[in-house]
Amino acid sequence: MRRSPERAKIQLSPKQVSMKVTQEKLPKSQLGLEIEIPAETTKKVYEKVVQNLARSANIPGFRKGKVPRQILLQRLGPGRIKEAALEDLVQNSLRDALSQETIEALGNYQLVSTFEELLSQFQPGQPLTFSASVDVPPDINLGDYGNLNVKAEDVKPDPDAVDNFLAERQVQHATLIPVESRPAQMGDVTVVDYQGRLTPEGEEAVDISGGEATDFQLELEEGRFLADIVQGIVGMTPGETKEIPVTFPEDYPREDLANQSAVFTLTLKELKEKELPELDDDFAQDISEEETISELRESLAKQFAEKAEQETKTNKENALIEALVAQVEIDLPETLIGQEVQTILTQTAIQMENYGMDLQKVFTAEMMPQLRQRSRPDAIARLRQSLTLEELAKRESLTVDDEQMDAKCQEVMQQLAGQDVDPQRLREFVKSDLLKEKAIQWLEEHATIELVPEGSLETEETTDTPETGSEVSEETAAQPEATADQESQEPSPTPDASEQTAASE
């Protein structure tokens, strides 16, 4: 809508306005409004605009505030004054209509009647009717949420988890011992020089850009490096030089090398083997706060059991939420979707900035529409879940006491130490979060949950889902193979180093 300069905005109290307002429900949680502005109001606002312009207008030959009405109308033109009055009428009348009808509007309104159409109809002292729409909180139909029947996977700790954990730590704390009496074998650590050349069929070999290194330390482990090179080093002795043929994988991160044939000239300069420390009390004290290896094993077993228990709990909660959201009927307004998309993009930007990435190269004007579109499905899913749990908490009159609120706020403040935090917004966030937790607890108490063996549901989904082909994003395809030292989410040997859950986004 156009804005006219040199005038003060007219403010009308809802008590001074009596309007006829007709409401109509529209798709996407919109509310259509037809608002009839009384003749008395159209005249009053028009006269007020004239008075304001008379006081503020600078017209040569007249002192400010002393411009005669007729001269003002001639100089500014009746059309310009009507525009200014109409703009105030529409904005203030819509605001007062929302208050009069107790309508909770989300975001700004959309004018259905065109401004030009209203301008042609507007006559001071005559009623004026216009149409607009506003987004409103959606109606949420939860369905039969009190009798959910779901399956969830029951996670059991791996009986070999403690032994595997300790074996990995042994390798990490191993001492490297030079080896001269035997050839290289898997598990050794080598120091090599290498130079790579592409060998296109029927063409001359070409050096690989960046495909050379000096004194490069390489562990002979699966997934550590190119598999052909690792296998090629096995059997070599220190001082030996060898040409190793290599075929780069199809999904190699460098597209110019993917699926290409090459030869690496490699010299083995040093060979070392790992001498593992004994699994004794000294080892336990080196890697944890426990005094004995027996205490460490007991502590680790407890942590693995707690981890499995937490995963089972999460599986049950996810199954309940998924079943509930699947049956919910909710028509999300675009205002909420847009806000959630912006939240996701902001969170993504913070994460990328923490990794040292240049946001200006990612969040460009050209990329923003695409980024928003990609974030839209996640935004809708998050909103459906969040609003559904909030509605359940409201229907079941679930509450959070001050003691819980204070404890959780203190916990979050400790996690966000050093950051600028709005205490009021934090408290609102914590209350919402705790209410959702209570809603999930309520679901669990009133649902039938069948625990099934771990992995069985994934097998069922694979069996039930028709094959549609595998779609892999470019980002996924560009990832190198996982290295041997990339650990799964394992418990820490030190109790005070346990994983913390971020409560703030």
Image: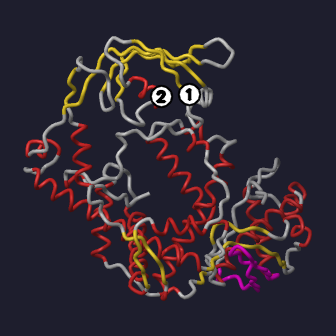
* Quadrant location of the N terminus in the rendered image: bottom right
Q: Nearer the viewer, residue 502 or 464?
A: 464
Drawn side of residue 4 relative to residue 505, left or right: right
Q: Tell me the amino acid under the disc marked 2.
A: Asp
Q: Nearer the viewer, residue 476 or 131?
A: 476
Drawn side of residue 479 relative to residue 332, left or right: left
Kindly identify which residue carries mark 1.
247
* Crowd around label 1: few <14 · some 14–19 · many ≥20 (10 Å): some
- x and y percentages locating residue 34 in the rendered image: 79, 80
How many numbered tags mark residues here?
A: 2
Q: Is residue 30 magenta?
A: yes
Q: Whole-Å distance between the Cαs marked 1 and 2?
A: 7 Å
Q: Is residue 147 magenta?
A: no
Residue drawn at (41%, 76%), measured in percent from left and top?
A: 435
Vertical relation: 3 (above or below) 48: above
Vertical relation: 137 (above or below) 289: below
* Quadrant location of the C terminus in the rendered image: bottom left
Q: Tell me the amino acid under the disc marked 1.
A: Thr
Dot 2 falls on a residue whose secondary structure is helix
Residue drawn at (76%, 86%), measured in percent from left and top?
A: 20
- Answer whether labels 1 and 2 touch (C-beta < 8 Å): yes
Residue drawn at (33%, 60%), measured in percent from left and top?
A: 412
* Crowd around label 2: few <14 · some 14–19 · many ≥20 (10 Å): some
Magenta segment, which residues?
14-39
- x and y percentages locating residue 386 in the rendered image: 51, 71
- For residue 217, what is the image quadrant? top left
Label number found at residue 92: none
- x and y percentages locating residue 262 in the rendered image: 56, 21
Dot 1 falls on a residue whose secondary structure is strand
Label number found at residue 228: 2
